[in-house]
Amino acid sequence: MSIPVVTVGQSREDVVGGLERLHGPVTVVRRCAELTELLAACQSGLARAAVVADGCEGLTASLVDRLGAVGVAIIALTDDADEAARLRGIGVASALTGVESAALAGRIAEAVSQLTGAATVATSGSGLGDTSAALRQRPADQAGVPPASGAGKIIAVWGPAGSPGRTFVAANIAGELAADGKSVLLVDADSYGASMAAVLGLLDESAGIAQACRLADQGLLDADALLKVANPVTTKLGTFRVLTGITRADRWTELRAAALSLVLERAKEVADVVVVDTGFCLEADEELSFDTMAPRRNAATLRSLELADTVYAVGAADPVGVPRLVRGLAELELAVPNVSPVVVMNKVRAAAVGRSPERQLKDAWGRYGPSAKIEAFLPADSAAADAALLGGSLLLETAPDSKLRQAIAKLVCAPVQQSSRSSVFSSTPRLQ
Ligand SMILES: Nc1ncnc2c1ncn2[C@@H]1O[C@H](COP(=O)(O)OP(=O)(O)OP(=O)(O)O)[C@@H](O)[C@H]1O
Ligand SMILES: [Mg+2]
C-alpha cells in the first residue's frame, strides 16, 4: 500500500514534485503552507509521514513528539550538517541533503517502519530522539562536581499531596550522594510548587529546568549547555548541581514531556545520579486532543517517574498522610505500571501515631497498606529541618549528627562512612 505523505515547503530540487511523479510507494496527499497546517493534517489522520522540505528550523522536540504520537514519521531536508545533527537529536527520522525523489521515497518507507517498530518504546514513555546525536564530548565540570561515568541513574522523589517532604528529602539525598563522592544533578520538576531554589537558599530566578527544556526542545541541549544552566551548590562535604524549578506555577506549560525526556537523558551523561523532585499529581490529562496541542500539567511528574531507575514514595506519617500515601501508591501503579517504589515514611513521631511509632506504622501498613513494605522511617525533627530551611542549607551541615540526616543518608548510601559502595547504585563504581 502506498504511504500517504504530507509535505511543507519547497526544496531546490523539487523532490516533493518528484515524489508525486513517482506514482509509487508514497502518495503526497497534501502540500501544506506551514508547519501548523501540517500538524493539523497529521492529527486528523491524513498521513503516515511528513516531509519538511524547508523551514525545518521550526521543528522542535515537542512537535516531533506530537507527530510521533499520532504515528507520523518526519523527514526533514537540509543542506546544513549542524542542523541535520540537531534534527536527529530531537527525533527527526531522517535529515537528508540533496536527495533524489526515489531515494527519499525509500527513506520515508524506512522511517515509517522504524516508527512502527518504535511505537512500543514511545508508549512506554521514552519519546526520545537520537540523544547521542547532539552529544559532544563531556566537558570538564568547572564547578568542583566530580566527573561522571556517562551512564547516570535517575532517582525520582515523589509523594502524594500534603507536603510530605519530597523537596526536603530530594535535596538531602542529593547532598548525601555528593558527600559520598558522586557526581549529582538535582532537578526540580514540580509543576505545581517548585521550591528547590528556596530550600537551597539560592536567589535564583532563572528556572534552570525551563531553560534546559527550551534548549532541548530546539535540539540545542548538549552537555555543555546543560552544565551552563545548572547552578553549582557547594556544601562542606561536596558540590552538586541543580536545575531550579519554574518560578511561577503558571509556567508549567514549559515542562513538556518530550523536552524533559531529553533533559533527563542528557542529565544522565553529566551526572552519576540525577535526583528529581516531582509534583504530587499523577492524573493523566490528555496531551493530544483532536484540535489542539494541549500540554499536560502532570507530564513532568509522569515522565520523571517513567524514566526513573528508583522511585522514592514519600508519605507523611500521620493519620492524614498514611491513607493518602496508600491511595497514592495505587494511583502510581496505574499511572506508571512498571515502577516498584521504595516507600519512605517521613516525619515519624509518637505525637501523631502513638507510642513506638515505627511499630504502629508497620502494623497498620501490614493490615491496610499495599504489598510494598515501608523501607525507611525518617524521624520528625522540626529543629533540624527548620534550621536547614532557615539557613538555605542541608542536614549534613546544620544537623550532621541528627538521626534524620543519618536515616536519609542510609537510604541512598551504605551506612555513612562505613562502606565504599552505594546500596542503591551498587553497580556504580565509587568515584574518588
Ligand atoms: N522529617 C522531617 N521533620 C520535620 N520537618 C520536616 C521533615 N521533612 C520535611 N519537613 C518539613 O516539612 C515541610 C514540607 O517539606 P517539603 O517542602 O519538602 O514538602 P513537599 O512534599 O516538597 O511539599 P510541596 O507540596 O510544597 O512540594 C518543610 O518545612 C520541611 O522542612
Ligand atoms: Mg516540594
Image (spheres, grey):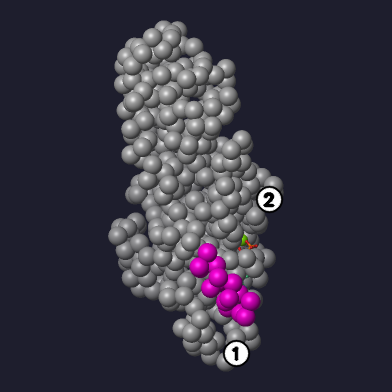
Q: Quadrant of the N terminus?
A: top left
Considering depth in this image, is 199 or 8 the residue closer to the camera? 8
What residue appears at the point 42 percent right and 24 percent down from the top-left corner?
Answer: 4
What residue appears at the point 51 percent right and 36 percent down from the top-left corner?
Answer: 66
Q: Is residue 23 above or below residue 289?
A: above
Which image quarter: residue 44?
A: top right
**Position of residue 418 measured from the top left corner of the image (x, y, whole percent):** 35, 73
Say few, some or many: other residues with alpha carbon within 10 Å of mark 1 (under 14 / 14 to 19 / 20 or more). few
Q: Quadrant of the C terminus?
A: bottom left
Tell me the SS state at disc 2. helix
Are discs 1 and 2 less than 8 Å apart at CB?
no
Considering depth in this image, is 422 or 25 the residue closer to the camera? 25
Residue 174 visible in the snapshot: no
User: Mainly helix, strand or loop, the magenta region?
Assistant: helix
Mark 1, residue position? 354
Magenta span covers which residues? Answer: 315-331
